Image: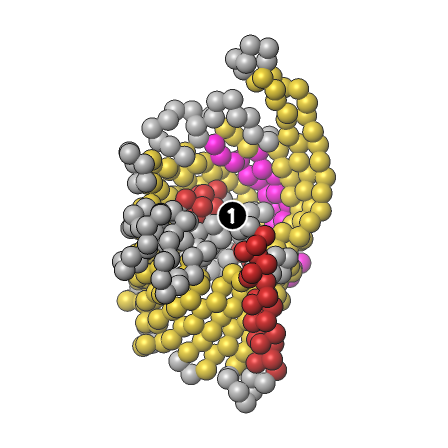
């Protein structure tokens, strides 16, 4: 998002935040039950990366220098507020450092097992992406399966403007989402165009469908499919996941995750197919500490050889309060980059120390 757009968004965001605070202070008599959540993630980074230059006849890249860097920063600082009144609830999330409005949604319960959601939200999509809360990321970052799926389908921050029917039938959860397609596209009454098309968006919205279920013994699985729309985001995608997360996850127990995604871009003369997958495993050493490792890969074009890249990730997570694991969490994560891409060397090693504080 460019600076002009950020400047345009900040004033409404901080005005909205002020309004939320006022409503919260008066919520006992005005709207209903209000809750707030705060997340701060600070991190220190250690990185080594190589510099390459073309050789004399420009036939190959030669290593010229290796650089080591240390840094400290804020990865995330989030403010979230929720207000409930009867069958309706509203949720807002703001990114502190940028001032950007991330989520702004209203839910209405149609029945005990069906609700309607409208606004800007994550919605149906990759479980490895925005459907994994930033407070529950396994390592320092979400896997490239979720991140690159999101950028491929026009939802760079995993969110879009739309409406969803979210329901439950027996052991199955489902969602049908109609949305604007472009995550930064707030539909106007006329002349609205997606960033992916020079044509007006038209009457037909972008459609995504998702279904998931719990199989028992801590296993859960789900599938998602997004339809292409040539006047919005002319990309189709299919994602799936299989997670093992035992309810009694304690010392000596294992948990694991498998994520998969397939994205097809229909904009050119021929379709471009991208594939990605991620496999992670974790072992609880004792109640306050777990160790984990994973491998994730992304192939941006299956018709091109030697263009895949990925990450080998290992990490240790420590919480001084295991009964509230996410409230104060320390993560030490090392990421080793791999690449099949010709003449595009990647940074070989990154180490992150993340300190998370979550108040709710």
Q: Is residue 149 above or below residue 214?
A: above
Q: Residue furthest top?
A: 57
Query: Is residue 321 one of those drawn in magenta?
Result: yes
Quadrant of residue 215 within the rendered picture: bottom left
Residue at the (54%, 56%) spot, across then down? 5
Counting every numbered tag in the picture gives 1
Residue at the (35%, 47%) spot, across then down? 197
Residue 280 is left or right of residue 169, and the answer is right
Query: Where residue 310 sits in the image (x, y, percent)?
Result: 49, 34
Q: Is residue 286 above or below residue 51?
A: below
Q: Is residue 251 visible?
A: no
The image's colouring method is: secondary structure
Q: Is residue 163 above or below residue 331?
A: below
Q: Secondary structure at mark 1?
A: loop
Residue at the (57%, 54%) spot, across then down? 4
Q: Is residue 71 visible?
A: yes
- Please name whichever residue, 144 or 105, is drawn nearer the observer in this view of the structure: 105
Residue 100 is left or right of residue 275, and the answer is right
Magenta span of residues: 309-336
Query: Where residue 75 sits in the image (x, y, percent)?
Result: 63, 51
Query: Where residue 34 sits in the image (x, y, percent)?
Result: 54, 78
Most common SS among magenta residues: strand
Residue bearing mark 1:
142
């Amino acid at each position: 998002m460019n600076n002009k757009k950020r400047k345009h968004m900040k004033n409404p965001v901080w005005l909205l935040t002020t309004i939320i605070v006022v409503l919260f202070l008066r919520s006992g008599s005005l709207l209903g039950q209000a809750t707030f959540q705060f997340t701060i993630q600070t991190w220190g980074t250690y990185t080594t990366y190589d510099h390459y230059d073309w050789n004399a006849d420009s036939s190959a890249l030669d290593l010229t220098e290796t650089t080591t860097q240390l840094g400290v920063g804020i990865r995330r600082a989030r403010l979230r507020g929720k207000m409930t009144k009867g069958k309706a609830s509203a949720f807002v999330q703001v990114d502190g450092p940028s001032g950007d409005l991330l989520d702004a949604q209203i839910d209405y319960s149609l029945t005990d097992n069906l609700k309607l959601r409208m606004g800007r939200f994550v919605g149906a999509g990759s479980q490895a992406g925005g459907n994994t809360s930033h407070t529950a990321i396994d390592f320092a970052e979400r896997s490239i399966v979720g991140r690159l799926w999101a950028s491929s389908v026009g939802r760079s921050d995993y969110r879009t403007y739309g409406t969803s029917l979210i329901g439950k039938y027996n052991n199955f959860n489902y969602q049908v989402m109609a949305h604007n397609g472009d995550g930064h596209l707030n539909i106007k009454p006329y002349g609205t165009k997606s960033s992916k098309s020079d044509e007006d968006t038209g009457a037909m919205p972008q459609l995504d469908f998702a279904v998931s279920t719990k199989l028992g013994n801590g296993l859960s699985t789900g599938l998602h499919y997004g339809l292409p729309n040539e006047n919005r985001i002319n990309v189709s995608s299919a994602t799936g996941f299989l997670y093992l997360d035992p309810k009694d996850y304690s010392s000596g127990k294992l948990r694991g995750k498998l994520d998969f995604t397939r994205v097809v871009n229909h904009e050119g003369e021929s379709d471009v197919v991208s594939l990605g997958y991620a496999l992670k495993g974790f072992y609880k050493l004792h109640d306050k500490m777990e160790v984990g490792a994973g491998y994730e890969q992304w192939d941006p074009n299956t018709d091109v050889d030697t263009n895949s890249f990925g990450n080998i990730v290992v990490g240790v997570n420590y919480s001084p309060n295991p009964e509230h694991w996410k409230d104060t969490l320390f993560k030490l994560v090392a990421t080793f980059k791999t690449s099949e891409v010709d003449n595009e060397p990647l940074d070989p090693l990154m180490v992150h120390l993340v300190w998370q504080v979550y108040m709710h």
